[in-house]
Image (cartoon, rainbow, N blue to C red):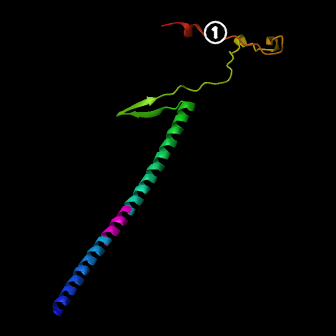
């Protein structure tokens, strides 16, 4: 009997040792999986940072192109699908008051002033005949 109890105790210890080894192996697998997830997360965040920086640079470039396009009417190559098209903005106009060119070399003088001392509105310059004719 005594020998059988010893054998049963040794068997229980052996089973417990196997279970402990299995738990340690599972713990090592979990640590490796956690480390892999942490590295993937770090790599993912680094990629997102790079993509975000690239996106910010693209937006800044597009804003600069848009402003140049609006202000200076620069020709820009735009890609639409597989086609390249030139986009030409109208040239900016002088936003100041445009007075007609003096005719016959006359320069406006003080005689063009109103009674109240303000400047008269200059009459519109007439277009040359070629500009008004229709084709």
Q: Which residue is mark 1?
A: 126
Residue at (71% x, 10% y) in the render: 104
Number of numbered discs: 1
Instruction: Report the front residue among 50 and 40.
Output: 40
Residue sticking out furthest to the front: 1
Instruction: Report the front residue among 121 and 59.
Output: 59
Check the image and report above or below for 95 versus 131. Answer: below
Give how far across and how far down residue 126 sits, in percent.
64, 9
Q: In what quadrant of the picture does the N terminus appear?
A: bottom left
Residue 110 within the segment the image draws in magenta: no
State the predominant SS element of the stretch in magenta. Answer: helix
In which image quadrant can residue 116 be found? Answer: top right
Residue sticking out furthest to the right: 116
Could you say whether the residue bearing mark 1 is in a helix, strand or loop?
loop
In the picture, measured across the screen, residue 27 lies left or right of residue 45, that is left
Give how far across and how far down residue 102 sits, in percent.
71, 14
Give how far across and how far down residue 68 sits, in percent.
55, 35
Check the image and report above or below for 131 versus 49. Answer: above
Magenta stretch bounds: 28-37
In which image quadrant can residue 81 be found? Answer: top left
Residue at (66% x, 11% y) in the render: 125
Residue at (58% x, 7% y) in the render: 129
Residue at (56% x, 10% y) in the render: 131
Residue sticking out furthest to the bottom: 2
In the picture, measured across the screen, residue 99 lies left or right of residue 80, that is right
In the picture, measured across the screen, residue 79 lies left or right of residue 128, that is left
Q: Residues within 10 Å of mark 1 (few under 14, many from 20)?
A: few
């Amino acid at each position: 009997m005594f020998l059988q109890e010893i054998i049963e105790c040794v068997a229980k210890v052996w089973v417990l040792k196997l279970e402990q080894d299995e738990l340690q192996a599972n713990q090592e697998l979990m640590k490796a999986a956690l480390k892999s997830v942490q590295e993937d997360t770090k790599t993912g965040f680094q990629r997102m940072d790079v993509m975000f920086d690239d996106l910010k640079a693209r937006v800044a470039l597009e804003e600069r192109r848009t402003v140049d396009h609006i202000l200076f009417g620069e020709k820009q190559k735009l890609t639409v699908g597989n086609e390249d098209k030139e986009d030409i903005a109208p040239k900016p106009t002088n936003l100041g008051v445009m007075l007609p060119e003096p005719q016959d070399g006359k320069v406006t003088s003080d005689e063009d002033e109103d009674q109240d001392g303000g400047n008269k509105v200059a009459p519109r310059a007439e277009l040359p005949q070629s500009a008004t004719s229709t084709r």
